[in-house]
Image (spheres, rainbow, N blue to C red):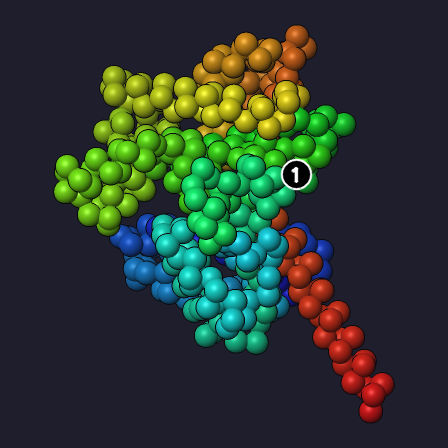
């Protein structure tokens, strides 16, 4: 029985996890506790995506969710000891450009970043702290969604604000970096030499953004200081005239907390449609407002993608990923149609068939559908970091032995 690395991806209402073989890196199990604030339930799948365990009626809260996951692990015969834990942490701020070993000092720095990602960061830290209390000897690695974008040039990071704010860390950080990291790692398998060229990856899900890459490195992205900017999302507004916020506070009397809820939880597809935040529901709905929300989503996606082109000087490859991007042929078609002026020509049959390659031979831009795998990226980062820390500790022990 092999030891395991466990990966956690904590959201506001769910806790996703995966177990990987600590030696081979192969996926063993993955699962999710859903509806944590309401009626939590755990489902676990094996590596073939077959369900192997289900339990409903769990206690609410992230601490209870983690406890039930670890209880399942302890009672399951096909899993070894957990030797490391990797965590998706949404915001790394200025200080974290790569994954780090979690220590008390790191936790203190991460707590200061909570205002930058209020929907995710508190839950990321909650899981780290609870896991540390239950397994204090197991190393934990924080892997940041912002780190991939630290290769952006300074002009792509700056806002047109007084310089002192940039010096204090008010910069365009970008998010979904773990997803982009994974796509960058596998893109040569699909696009050959063009993977090193001018690429845009569209991560379209309940949270949505795009990343412009050259040499498989981020040079620009649609999200900014927080995960609120850029594309229209499931419940988030995306790019917004700052004057709207001033108007809401000055004339409507909304407090900062009320504006936060409005922009993060009550806007986007949910707010415009009045039907649902889920694109699948909207595509199945006949309501005019649902269609308008879909059209606005695709219009904004095409407009934001076009805005990334100057950072690249052209476009060789467009990749669709995440739940909507990899799952909806209709949304891909709608977006590509709006970008036909760039020379995008979709192969309709390949698109509907959910093939990986969906461009026509006549297309000036190669089009791909690639499912993302953030958990795989976190597992790889965790194994690399644990090996590095282990090597450093061994070198230190050797030096102490030699000195004695």
Q: Is residue 198 visible?
A: yes
Left or right side of 318 for 273: left
- Classify residue 259 as left or right of residue 187: left
The image quadrant where one finds the N terminus is bottom right
Residue at image point 48% right, 34% down: 222
| 225 displayed left or right of 313 | left
Name the image quarter holding residue 357. Answer: top right
Residue 14 vs 394, above or below: the answer is above
Q: Quadrant of the C terminus?
A: bottom right
- The location of residue 188, given as percent across then percent down, is 72, 32
* Residue sitting at x 26%, y 26%: 273
Residue 396 location (% of width, % of height): 75, 78
Q: Position of residue 15 (x, y in %)?
A: 42, 54
Query: Compared with residue 182, is residue 403 higher up or lower down, i.e. above or below?
Result: below
**In percent of the image, x 75 and y 69: which residue is there?**
391
- Residue bearing the label numbered 1: 217
Helix, strand or loop under label 1: strand
Question: How many marks do you count on the picture?
Answer: 1
Q: Nearer the viewer, residue 165 or 242?
A: 165
Q: Residues within 10 Å of mark 1 (few under 14, many from 20)?
A: some
Compared with 153, 300 (above or below) is above
Q: Nearer the viewer, residue 309 or 291?
A: 309
Q: Residue at x 71, y 64 (%)?
A: 387
- Quarter of the image for residue 184 reads top right
- 28 or 348, which is in the foreground? 348
The residue lying furthest to the bottom in this view is 404
Horizontal relation, residue 43 to residue 201: left or right: left
């Amino acid at each position: 029985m092999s030891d395991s690395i466990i990966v956690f991806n904590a959201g506001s209402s769910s806790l996703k996890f995966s177990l990987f073989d600590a030696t081979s890196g192969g996926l063993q199990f993955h699962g999710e506790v859903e509806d944590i604030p309401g009626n939590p339930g755990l489902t676990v799948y094996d590596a073939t995506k077959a369900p192997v365990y289900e339990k409903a009626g769990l206690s609410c809260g992230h601490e209870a969710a983690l406890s039930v996951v670890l209880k399942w692990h302890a009672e399951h015969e096909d899993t070894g000891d957990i030797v490391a834990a990797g965590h998706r942490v949404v915001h790394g701020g200025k200080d974290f450009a790569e994954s780090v070993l979690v220590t008390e000092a790191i936790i203190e720095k991460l707590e200061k970043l909570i205002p930058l990602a209020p929907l995710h960061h508190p839950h990321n830290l909650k899981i780290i702290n609870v896991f540390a209390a239950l397994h204090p000897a197991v190393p934990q690695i924080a892997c940041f969604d912002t780190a991939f974008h630290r290769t952006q040039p300074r002009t792509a990071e700056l806002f047109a604000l007084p310089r002192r704010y940039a010096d204090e860390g008010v910069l365009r950080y970008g998010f979904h970096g773990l997803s982009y990291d994974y796509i960058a790692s596998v893109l040569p398998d699909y696009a050959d030499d063009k993977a090193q060229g001018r690429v845009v990856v569209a991560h379209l899900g309940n949270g949505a953004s795009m990343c412009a890459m050259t040499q498989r490195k981020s040079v620009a992205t649609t999200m900014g200081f927080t995960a609120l900017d850029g594309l229209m999302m499931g419940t988030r507004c995306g790019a917004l005239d700052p004057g709207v916020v001033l108007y809401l506070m000055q004339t409507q009397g909304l407090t900062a907390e009320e504006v936060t809820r409005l922009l993060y939880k009550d806007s986007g597809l949910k707010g415009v449609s009045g039907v649902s935040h889920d694109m699948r529901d909207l595509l199945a709905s006949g309501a005019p407002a649902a269609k308008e929300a879909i059209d606005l989503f695709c219009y904004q996606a095409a407009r934001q993608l076009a805005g990334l082109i100057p950072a690249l000087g052209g476009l060789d490859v467009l990749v669709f990923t995440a739940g909507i991007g990899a799952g909806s042929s209709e949304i891909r078609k709608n977006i590509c149609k709006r970008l036909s002026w760039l020379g995008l020509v979709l192969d309709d049959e390949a698109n509907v068939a959910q093939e990986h390659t969906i461009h026509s031979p006549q297309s000036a831009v190669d089009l791909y559908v690639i499912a993302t795998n953030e958990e795989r990226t976190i597992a790889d980062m965790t194994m690399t970091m644990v090996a590095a820390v282990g090597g450093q500790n061994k070198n230190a022990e050797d030096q102490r032995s030699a000195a004695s």
